[in-house]
């Protein structure tokens, strides 16, 4: 409704309008009085829209469409010049003190001579603009110009958010394109992803498909171009946003960290960082820092089987803790083989998120132990069932199949043990 009110020329037949709709029609000068007498409908509401858009998730297709439509309306040829002219009329010095009497401008002032020239025509237009603003906002209103420095700062911030949203939409599109064809089937089985640290929780783009991703990028691209036309932004300014965004990406091409500062106890989010997290523009790469055996049960695991295996492995570790420590301390191949299976790899080099976590992990070291949790995964169980099914097709019974699988794993583990030990020897 607001955008319709701003464009009365759309609902008036124009005999001079060309039949081509490919190029936007220039707003005729005859609508300048309408724009001036309804100045707040254009300027004040647009500034309010900018503040609202800065708190909106621009990655969403419907929000991107909203910004695109508003920018397209204000980017109509000659409309921005009319609005700017109206603001100049309102902000110009008053030649006559306005008393809400239009007739004051039809007679000369009492202090001047009757031979003196009448007030210029622009004064009457200025009074109409001032009368419109004062009647709605009051005599002591504080007017924020649409083309002033404050609004321009908001526009630059919006342009930066649009650039970030475009990059986020492209990242989601790339993730969807890299997904295998059988992703949905594996997801139904519950083991399509073994990432224990969580994944990016995007908005409705994931559900609406590639077409919505393409439309979102198109809406944001055109909205950015319209804003550049309205406020005469230079290409260098827009290119600076793109370069600043590109230089802060990590080597994997994922989103950068939210805006934050370093405090005594770790990272502290700024208001901008909280906004970025709420709208899904950026996120922290959260890693599980506790005991892997005690982490929450995943969707691709059988809860009752995981609990049973945990009790069994805990009993074995408690009963044979000394023997496992002695085996892992050996310098021969058997010791390397036991260390490969009974110790947690990469524990010493794990990235710690804060000084508090560093103090906690430093005081808690774990010795060698057996973990059977992998047997509670749907993926492992389905793989074993498929192996037994294929073996039955070749007339191989369950016991010989089990022996073959065990032998194959021992050979694989031996090779991985040799490679691991060789890699440690080449480390500085």
Image: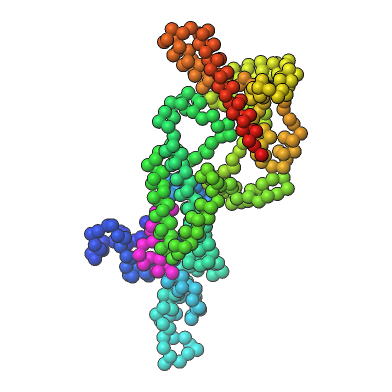
Above or below residue 71? Residue 415 is above
List x then y, in percent, for residue 413. 58, 22
Name the residue at 41% across, 48% down.
217
Residue 47 seen by the camera: no
Read off the magenta span: 67-84
Decide if residue 359 is on the left or right side of residue 75: right
Q: Main secondary structure of the magenta part?
A: helix
Residue 137 lies in magenta, yes or no?
no
Above or below residue 274? Residue 233 is below
Residue 71 lies in magenta, yes or no?
yes
Residue closer to the observer: 342 or 310: 342
Residue closer to the observer: 20 or 172: 172
List x then y, in percent, for residue 82. 39, 69
Residue closer to the observer: 159 or 6: 159
List x then y, in percent, for residue 120. 41, 82
Residue closer to the observer: 172 or 28: 172
User: What colour scheme does the image use?
Assistant: rainbow
């Amino acid at each position: 409704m607001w955008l319709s009110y701003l464009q009365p020329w759309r609902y008036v037949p124009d005999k001079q309008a060309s039949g081509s709709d490919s190029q936007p029609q220039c707003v005729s000068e005859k609508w300048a009085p309408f724009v001036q007498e309804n100045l707040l409908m254009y300027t004040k509401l647009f500034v309010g829209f900018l503040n609202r858009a800065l708190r909106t998730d621009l990655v969403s297709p419907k929000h991107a469409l909203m910004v695109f439509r508003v920018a397209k309306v204000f980017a109509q040829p000659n409309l921005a010049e009319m609005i700017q002219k109206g603001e100049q009329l309102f902000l110009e010095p008053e030649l006559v003190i306005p008393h809400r009497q239009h007739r004051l401008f039809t007679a000369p002032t009492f202090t001047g001579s009757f031979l003196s020239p009448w007030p210029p025509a622009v004064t009457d237009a200025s009074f109409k603009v001032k009368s419109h603003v004062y009647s709605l906002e009051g005599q002591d209103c504080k007017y924020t110009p649409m083309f002033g420095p404050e609004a321009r700062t908001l526009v630059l911030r919006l342009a930066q958010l649009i650039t970030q949203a475009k990059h986020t939409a492209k990242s989601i599109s790339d993730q969807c394109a890299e997904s295998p064809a059988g992703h949905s089937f594996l997801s139904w089985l519950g083991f399509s992803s073994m990432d224990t640290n969580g994944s990016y929780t995007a908005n409705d783009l994931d559900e609406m498909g590639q077409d919505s991703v393409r439309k979102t990028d198109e809406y944001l691209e055109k909205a950015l171009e319209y804003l550049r036309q309205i406020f005469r932004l230079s290409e260098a300014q827009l290119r600076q946003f793109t370069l600043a965004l590109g230089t802060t990406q990590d080597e994997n091409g994922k989103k950068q960290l939210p805006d934050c500062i370093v405090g005594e106890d770790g990272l502290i989010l700024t208001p901008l960082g909280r906004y970025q997290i709420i709208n899904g523009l950026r996120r922290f790469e959260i890693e599980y820092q506790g005991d892997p055996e005690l982490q929450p049960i995943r969707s691709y695991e059988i809860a009752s089987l995981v609990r049973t295996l945990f009790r069994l492995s805990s009993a074995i570790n408690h009963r044979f803790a000394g023997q496992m420590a002695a085996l892992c301390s050996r310098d021969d191949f058997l010791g390397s083989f036991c260390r490969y299976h009974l110790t947690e790899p990469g524990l010493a080099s794990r990235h710690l998120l804060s000084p508090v976590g560093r103090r906690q992990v430093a005081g808690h070291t774990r010795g060698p132990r057996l973990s059977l949790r992998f047997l509670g995964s749907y993926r492992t169980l389905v793989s074993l069932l498929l192996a037994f099914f294929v073996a039955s097709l070749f007339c191989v019974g369950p016991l010989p199949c089990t022996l073959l699988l065990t032998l194959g794993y021992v050979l694989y583990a031996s090779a991985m043990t040799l490679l691991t030990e060789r890699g440690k020897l080449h480390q500085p």
